[in-house]
Image (cartoon, rainbow, N blue to C red):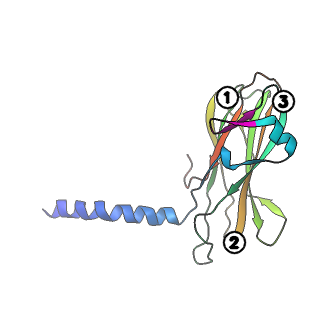
Amino acid sequence: MCISLAAATLATAAPGLESEAAAASLFNRVPASACSPETPDDDAALELSNGSWIFSGTETGTMTLWCPVATDKPWSSLDPYNIYNLRLWYRDPDGTATGSQVTARLYRREVDSSNSLSMTDEINSNSSNVTGSNTLWESVTNTNDDVLFYVRVTISRSSTTASVAFHGVDLPSTPP
């Protein structure tokens, strides 16, 4: 009887503990559709297809996308943001070859400044030999400051037949 009562108490307490732990860190997902091309040329060369950015028709080159990271709680020095990892979701049809590539890097910017600081090394799809959809991640140099966050993504291809795609990014609290 005592064992089953203890198990029932733990089962009802565990969800609350889990949500409080999750609230201590940002675990935001940024779908590709929330990202904007950097220039009109980038916008003309890319299109959204099934929620992912891909190259339009016979376009080639390197295009840049900016992805805002919306915070899910107000910043407080008593409860600062904790970001631990950046994960890139992508498709690179040639793996480690250099004909196509997707990169991502997380940045932070002080609210009253135009200077940005990198919080990660660059994630590069050419570091993986997977030739289809994949994820790669990078740990984050954390911040306790009241800052704005964004991800800079590049997508490139040198052949019109390379079906490279950017699916999105997220900020998991533990390495995927």
Badge 1 or badge 2: first in the primary sequence: 1
Q: Where residue 65 appears, x then y in whole percent?
A: 77, 46
Counting the numbered discs, the total is 3
Q: Nearer the viewer, mark 3 or mark 1?
A: 3
Residue that mark 3 sits on: 60
Residue at (55% x, 45% y) in the render = 176
Q: Is residue 112 visible?
A: yes
Cα distance in 3D space between marks 3 and 1: 22 Å
Q: Residue furthest bottom?
A: 78
Q: Residues within 10 Å of mark 2 (few under 14, many from 20)?
A: some
**Quarter-wise, where is residue 7 in the image?**
bottom left
Amino acid type of the residue that numbered disc 3 sits on in the rendered structure = Thr
Amino acid type of the residue that numbered disc 1 sits on in the rendered structure = Asn
Magenta stretch bounds: 47-55
Describe the element under mark 1 as helix, strand or loop.
loop
Residue that mark 2 sits on: 146
Q: Residues within 10 Å of mark 3 (few under 14, many from 20)?
A: some
Cα distance in 3D space between marks 1 and 2: 38 Å
Q: Nearer the viewer, mark 1 or mark 2?
A: 2
Q: Quadrant of the N terminus?
A: bottom left
Q: Where residue 42 appears, x then y in whole percent?
A: 83, 41
Residue that mark 1 sits on: 129
Q: Where residue 169 appears, x then y in whole percent?
A: 64, 47
**Quarter-wise, where is residue 108 in the image?**
bottom right
